Amino acid sequence: YFRSPTAKQNVIRALDKGVDVVGGIPHFERTMADGAASVTELCEMAADRGLMVDMHCDESDDPLSRHIEMLAYETQRLCLQGRVAGSHLTSMHSMDNYYVSKLIALMAEAEVSAIANPLINITLQGRHDTYPKRRGMTRVPELRKAGLTVAFGHDCVMDPWYSMGSGDMLEVASMGLHVAQMTSRDDIRACFDAVTTQPAKIMGIEGYGIEVGNNADFVVLQARDTIEAIRMRANRLFVIRRGKIIAETPMAQTRLHLADRPDHVREHEYAPAL
């Protein structure tokens, strides 16, 4: 924001053209002070225009990168509660626990949402470490326990930072549960929510969910439940948009050619009981 002489003008021009979320990247500024000042100015823009904020915040292994604290403060000062998200927040992985105990409480008080990006976070963070290497992803279980809305994003699909992406949010959920060690049945279900209901809540999407009267926008998965969907990277049978099929994939089935064995595999028979 401050490092580029035209950044502020570009942001204003984009907002004037209809962009409806204000973003920023405070840890990319030259100094911590400039980063904090950018958070203030960008949040003020959002408040003046009645917009949401998604701040690309503290994507760093530096435990002293604490712009999320300023974001929580400005959220409260400007009455932006429920309209602000901090994305990445990877520096929280490296912060000392005492400070984090204060920080998470501030975030919860301000109703700031958190968006982790498991694929890119596990790929980029810890690059300066020898061993042990940090996982880098923010503290998802602790943020959830404090009552924050926590989502998983993809962030990069095919770009210089991450060239292996496919836009598959089930892959994102799977990586998230592995990195955060969220392997209980309830935690796995929460990871599915982190790529479905929780992002919709953060974005303020109206008419979301399988309810009478809501928009008929959904994906039909070849799985009996959300846990199996993540475990098997379930096949997407149908993509429905406003009640119309816009994409479909044939049902996948593995056939066996082994003596005295069934001729096909039913994956759900190998899953734990619900």
Image: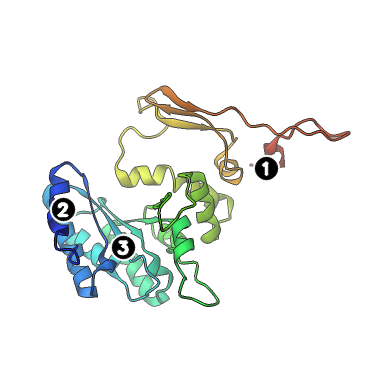
Which circle, 1 or 2, is nearer the viewer?
2
Q: Position of residue 14 (x, y in %)?
A: 17, 47
Nearer to us: label 3 or label 2: 2
Disc on the earlier residue, 1 or 2? 2
Q: Which mark is residue 182?
A: none
At 48% from the left edge and 45% from the top edge, which residue is drawn?
A: 166
Q: Which residue is mark 2?
A: 10
Residue type at mark 2? Asn
Q: Position of residue 52 (x, y in %)?
A: 23, 49
**What residue is shown with label 1?**
273
Q: Quadrant of the C terminus?
A: top right
Q: Is residue 94 visible?
A: yes
Amino acid residing under circle 3: Cys
Label count reads: 3
Quadrant position of residue 234: top right
The quarter of the displayed image where residue 132 is located: bottom right
- Residue 8: percent from the left, percent from the top? 14, 58
Q: Quadrant of the N terminus?
A: bottom left
Q: Against 267, is 68 above or below?
A: below
Identify the residue position indicated by label 3 in the image: 57
Q: Is residue 14 or residue 213 the one in the foreground?
A: 14
Residue 152 appearing in the image: no
Lateral position of residue 146 relative to residue 111, left or right: right
Between disc 1 and disc 3, whose residue precedes? 3
Q: Nearer the viewer, residue 147 or 23?
A: 23
Out of 273 and 39, give the one closest to the viewer.
39
Point out the tag, 3 or 2, that comes first from the N-terminus.
2
